[in-house]
Image (cartoon, rainbow, N blue to C red):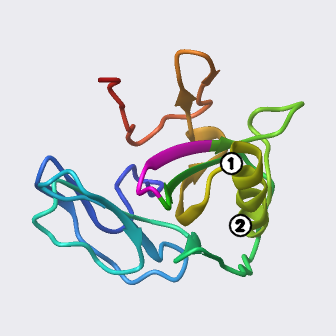
Amino acid sequence: YSKDNKPIGLFLADGKHINAFQTNDLFNGFFSINSKESAAIGDQVPDLSSRLALQSGPLFITDDIARRLSIRDDEPARRIVVAQTTEEAIIFLALYGKENTFEGPMLADVPKHLKEVEKLLGISIINALNLDGGSASAFITKDHSLTELSPVGSFFCMIDK
């Protein structure tokens, strides 16, 4: 979200067009779910008839290859990531510091940390995209809670079936 609380780039929710695609070097990736509930993460603009689509970035991993990132004014911060495994499962991850949960890795270092997460969890991540980070991010599960310090623009909610 921008400083005026509007989405940066493409944002479709429940098939409704909320914001248009924009060319942006940092927001170079997309997360989408089509009408058949198939999810995708990549650098191609998704079908605009998708049930959900958003533009974010940067992309950390594409086609199982960790990207080399060079980020101007990079700072350590909590990072919220959406990733896709080789089994096509979609997972959401929060990377944060032990001492201060609002701190975490530099954005440019996230790809190498995701490779460490793969080993730790015994998974293989084929695509990964930064969603947000810092004080305007939250991550809440039944076992763990990372609350925001400043307002969050939008949330993903998951339902266990």
Quarter of the image where one finds residue 111: bottom right
Circle 1 or circle 2, nearest the eye: 1
Question: Is 146 within the magenta?
Answer: no
Q: Earlier in the sequence, mark 1 or mark 2?
A: 2
Is the residue 126 above or below the residue 39 in the image? Answer: below
- Identity, as a three-letter code, of the amino acid under mark 2: Pro
SS at badge 1:
loop
Count of marks overlaid on the render: 2
Marks 1 and 2: CB-CB under 8 Å? no
Q: Quadrant of the C terminus?
A: top left
**Cα separation between marks 1 and 2:** 16 Å
**Percent position of residue 91, x then y:** 49, 46
Quarter of the image where one finds residue 68: bottom right
Dot 1 alpha-carbon crowd within 10 angstroms: few under 14, some 14 to 19, many 20 or more: few
Identified at 62% across, 52% down, the residue is: 123
Identified at 73% across, 50% down, the residue is: 117
In the drawing, does residue 18 fall left or right of residue 159? left
The residue indicated by pointer 2 is 111
From the viewer's side, name the closer residue of 90 and 105: 90
Identified at 17% across, 72% down, the residue is: 47
Is the residue 51 above or below the residue 86 in the image? Answer: above
Quarter of the image where one finds residue 78: top right
- Identity, as a three-letter code, of the amino acid under mark 1: Gly
From the viewer's side, name the closer residue of 55 and 8: 55
Which residues fall within the magenta stretch?
87-93
> What label sits on residue 79 in the rendered view?
none
In the drawing, does residue 150 fall left or right of residue 153? right
Can you see residue 15? yes
The residue indicated by pointer 1 is 122
